[in-house]
Amino acid sequence: MNPNLLEISDYTGEGYQPLVDYEQWRVAILRYIDELLPENIGKMQRHNETDEVFVLLSGRCILFLGEGDELVGTIHAQDMQPLKLYNVKCGAWHTHTLDEAATVLIVENCDTTSANSPEVELSAEQRRQLIELTRTLWPDRP
């Protein structure tokens, strides 16, 4: 087949991997990585110039969202359901935890970088809250 007709990509490694950048958008895959275990999460990020779309393809993923402007206030947890689209709005603090079987499709602006995606450190209490929210949503997690 003519390679100008179709591009096929996959990713089976750990963590975040962009697969396609085209004009203004990027498609990436997020897979399990130890740093996203609830006990290892120490910060949240937000994107100042784009929404970010997440679709759980397999496994389990909890999307954590923090209210607030410069600092994270109340933290909410959304246990993602497979094949549903979750659109994290521009400027919303967020992070996530995944189980070892998780694969998440991500769509965002292709110019999303650390320069326009600030991070904020979580307090010890907020870190404990992420662990407790995970235990509540995933009581069978070891």
Image (cartoon, rainbow, N blue to C red):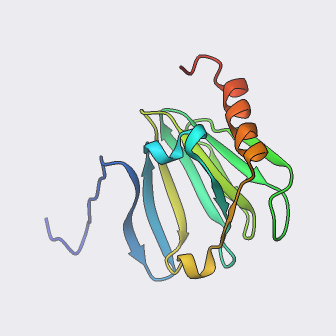
Which residue occupies the extreme front position in the image? Answer: 124
- In the picture, residue 32 is in which quadrant? top left
Q: Locate residue 101 relative to residue 2 in the image: left or right.
A: right
Q: Is residue 62 above or below residue 89?
A: above
Q: Residue at x 80, y 59 (%)?
A: 72
Q: Locate residue 74 relative to residue 49 in the image: left or right.
A: right
Q: Residue at x 78, y 54 (%)?
A: 66
Q: Is residue 83 visible?
A: no
Q: Locate residue 137 relative to residue 16 in the image: left or right.
A: right
Between residues 5 and 118, which one lies in front from this camera angle?
118
Between residues 5 and 10, which one lies in front from this camera angle?
10
Q: Position of residue 58 (x, y in %)?
A: 46, 36
Q: Residue at x 66, y 58 (%)?
A: 44
Q: Position of residue 36 (x, y in %)?
A: 52, 45
Q: Is residue 109 above or below residue 99?
A: below
Q: Residue at x 57, y 82 (%)?
A: 115
Q: Is residue 68 visible?
A: yes
Which residue occupies the extreme top position in the image? Answer: 140
- In the picture, residue 46 is in which quadrant? bottom right
Q: Position of residue 81 (x, y in %)?
A: 62, 35
Instruction: Quarter of the image for the N terminus: give it.
Output: bottom left
Total numbered badges shown on the rendered structure? 0
